[in-house]
Amino acid sequence: IKVWNGIVFDTGDSTNTYPYFDTYVFDTDSRIYFGDGLFSIIPEGTEDHPVAKLSWWGIAAYANWRSAEDGRTPCYDLSTWECDFETNGYRLPTEAEWEYAARGGHRDPYYRFPWGDEITISDANWDATSGNTTTAVGTYPANAYGLYDIAGNVWEWALDGFHWRYSDPDIALKAVRGGSFGPTAAGTTGPAREAESMDNTAPNLGSPRAHP
């Protein structure tokens, strides 16, 4: 990878078309600092917070890198950004996979949140509790599948292109799920489903990962 004006790109991206993530030098909302050729997390004590300000492309590139590190076959073709589902590499979950995992086994009835239909300041990092910033993963209870921050903290990228009715998706936009520390109430359906451009590196936008 390379760093240009505080933004990280692939070294092969000669036109800087696909930004991966912002560093603190470009945007002080980023907790990723780059200096003297090294990356670090700032401020001290936030190492357990979710990493935000990552584009969809950055998440895909990271998934490929981590797959290779763990002896898996990478999923993404970084020239087309298509995912080969036949590989065993890490990838973003589809919306359907994300929602299945988020519900933690609850199907009848379908709750608005992983734990029920109401939310309190003890359930998740959202507008009423956050102070407009992230919190460490594990601060709030996990769902029934042991997954943390399914609701709130940071929006999570999904693999899919976005469409309000889940059909004929717009390939230029990707779905994000789960809500964040911002003003949108956290949840697994309804208001906690939005569309974002693939280059979005907002401070309340991060990612899970999945593999077969």
Image (cartoon, rainbow, N blue to C red):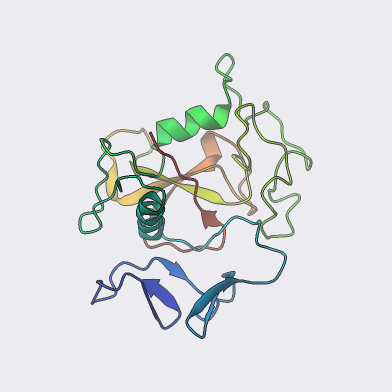
Q: Where is residue 185 in the image (x, y as percent from the top left)?
A: 63, 43
Residue drawn at point x = 37 percent, y = 62 percent: 199
Classify residue 161 by image quadrant. Answer: top left
Residue drawn at point x = 57 percent, y = 13 percent: 108
Looking at this view, name the residue that lies furthest to the top: 108
Q: Which of 52 and 43 is in front in this view?
A: 43
Relative to 47, say whether 27 is above or below: below
Point out the image quarter for the C terminus.
Answer: top left
| Apparent side of residue 14 relative to residue 101 in the rendered image (left or right) | left
Q: Which of 198 and 43 is in front in this view?
A: 43
Relative to 25, say whether 41 is above or below: above
Q: Position of residue 178 (x, y in %)?
A: 55, 42
Relative to 92, say whether 11 is above or below: below
| Apparent side of residue 207 relative to residue 127 in the rendered image (left or right) | left
Relative to 31, say whether 152 is above or below: above
Q: Nearer the viewer, residue 95 or 195?
A: 95
Can residue 145 be seen here? yes
Residue drawn at point x = 56 percent, y = 70 percent: 30
| Apparent side of residue 193 relative to residue 8 in the rendered image (left or right) | right
Q: Which of 92 and 158 is in front in this view?
A: 92
Residue drawn at point x = 67 percent, y = 28 percent: 115
Q: Position of residue 192 (x, y in %)?
A: 54, 41
Point out the image quarter for the N terminus.
Answer: bottom left
Can residue 198 be seen here? no
